[in-house]
Image: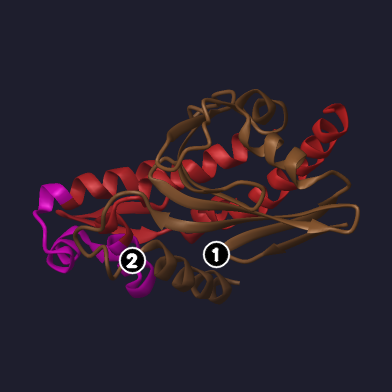
């Protein structure tokens, strides 16, 4: 049905962004462009291992990309990865439209 | 007649069914009937009742939607929370008698936090985040 792969992809992004600290990090990267882990740590106000862990989750969801330069790791936001989430409501419209059709059929079958 | 309204905040669907409100209400609130048009479920029309809607699992999603009944007003209104993967939304059904049938309105409003807000949660709530996101995406084009 409509709650299928596409919704699953959106859920993947949702899950990565379900944590407010990760949302804050992603937003900061969207706003400021590329940032080092150090700068992000200062911004987030949590420990560097915690920030690294959050960045790994964002990376797995393809929401950020990284590159190494010397001892520093630079991160930047990948806004394209948000598309499944932005499409989410569109999928739900299709989903409900389909379910309304099913409901109509059921009502016809009922006494 | 079928009207769909979309925004980043909600999906609204409206249709007039040529059936009495009593019958539509049964279809919306009797578990075996719900299973026939929506999903497998353990719904009961009792405020506070926690139930699940289950569809086929797919990669990255177990197919489970966690719900809780919020409003039950027979033949008039039914609403429940609808949560998947930390993402909470609210589904609200409103029935109104119409000429020769029932006007059914369904509104699913998103995006709400399932968990209580914690660190920076107030500033980075979903609503705000998505509002800003739209701007970011438009700028990116």
A65 left or right of B94 in image: left
Tell me the magenta residue range.
Answer: A24-50
Chain identity of mark 1: B
| Residue A94 lies in the magenta stretch | no
**Chain under numbered label 2:** A
Q: Main secondary structure of the magenta part?
A: helix
Judge by depth and name the residue closer to the eye, A21 or A64: A21
- Which residue is labeled 1 in the image? B9
Q: Colour of chain B?
A: brown
The answer to whether B49 is drawn above or below residue A78 in the figure is above
Secondary element at image label 2: helix
Task: Check if mark 1's residue and mark 2's residue have beta carbons within 8 Å.
Answer: no
Task: Name the residue at 22% across, 65% down.
Answer: B120
Which quarter of the rendering shows the N terminus of chain A?
top right
Above or below, B53 relative to B130: above
Instruction: Give A39 or B99, whichever is nearer the viewer.
Output: B99
């Amino acid at each position: 049905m409509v709650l299928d792969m596409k919704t699953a992809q959106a859920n993947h992004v949702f899950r990565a962004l379900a944590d407010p600290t990760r949302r804050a990090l992603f937003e900061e990267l969207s706003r400021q462009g590329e940032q080092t882990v150090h700068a992000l740590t200062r911004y987030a106000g949590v420990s560097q291992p915690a920030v690294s862990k959050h960045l790994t989750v964002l990376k797995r969801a393809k929401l950020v990309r990284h590159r190494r330069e010397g001892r520093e790791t630079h991160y930047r936001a990948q806004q394209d990865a948000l598309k499944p989430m932005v499409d989410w409501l569109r999928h739900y419209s299709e989903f409900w439209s389909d379910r309304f059709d099913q409901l109509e059929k059921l009502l016809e079958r009922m006494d | 007649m079928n009207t769909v309204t979309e925004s980043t905040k909600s999906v609204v669907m409206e249709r007039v069914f040529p059936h009495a409100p009593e019958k539509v209400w049964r279809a919306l609130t009797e578990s075996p009937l719900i299973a026939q048009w929506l999903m497998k479920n353990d719904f009961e029309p009792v405020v506070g009742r926690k139930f699940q809607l289950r569809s086929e699992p797919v990669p990255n999603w177990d197919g489970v939607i966690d719900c809780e009944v919020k409003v039950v007003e027979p033949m008039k209104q039914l609403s429940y929370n609808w949560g998947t993967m930390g993402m909470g939304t609210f589904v609200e059904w409103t029935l109104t008698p119409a000429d020769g049938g029932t006007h059914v309105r369904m509104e699913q409003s998103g995006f709400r936090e399932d968990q209580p807000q914690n660190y920076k949660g107030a500033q980075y709530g979903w609503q705000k985040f998505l509002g800003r996101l739209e701007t970011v995406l438009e700028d990116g084009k």
